[in-house]
Amino acid sequence: MAAGFVDFEITWQADVFRGAPQASSAAEFGTQGINFRARKPVNEQEWETAWAALACEVPTSSPLSPGTTGSAIARRDL
């Protein structure tokens, strides 16, 4: 079975650098702390179903098209 997780969920997030000496640098990059949960699929079929559903819009920024979005799909062969 391929390596990977299903049912990924962020369960908590916070500005963990607030008040730290480099808080402004962390805020500039949108850095946050998170807790997450996920699990291994129980079989290949569950993994294939989850993989088939993966597609998302990823914000991109370039001098030619600032603030646009582009489609991204994770590569399985990485």
Image (cartoon, rainbow, N blue to C red):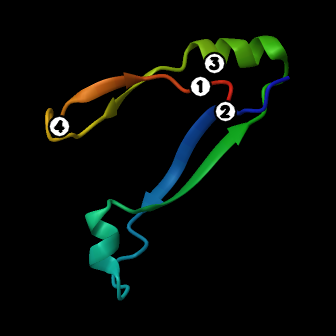
Residue at the location (60% across, 12% down)?
Answer: 52
Numbered mark located on residue 75 in the image: 1
Q: Earlier in the sequence, mark 4 or mark 3?
A: 3
Does residue 4 lie above or below 24 as drawn? above
Does residue 53 lie above or below 66 as drawn? above
The Cα atoms of the two marked residues, 1 and 3, are separated by 10 Å
The quarter of the picture where residue 76 lies is top right
Numbered mark located on residue 78 in the image: 2
What is the crowding at mark 4: few (fewer than 14 residues within 10 Å), some, or many (at least 20)? few
Dot 1 and dot 2 residues touching (CB under 8 Å): yes
Q: Position of residue 17 (x, y in %)?
A: 40, 76
> Looking at the image, is mark 1 or mark 3 nearer the viewer?
1
The quarter of the picture where residue 27 lies is bottom left
The Cα atoms of the two marked residues, 2 and 3, are separated by 14 Å
Q: Which residue is mark 4?
A: 67
> Looking at the image, is mark 4 or mark 3 nearer the viewer?
4
Dot 4 and dot 1 residues touching (CB under 8 Å): no
Q: Amino acid at mark 4?
A: Gly
Q: In the picture, which quadrant includes the C terminus?
A: top right
Q: Earlier in the sequence, mark 4 or mark 1?
A: 4
Using residue 44 as the reference point, say whether residue 48 is left or right of it: left
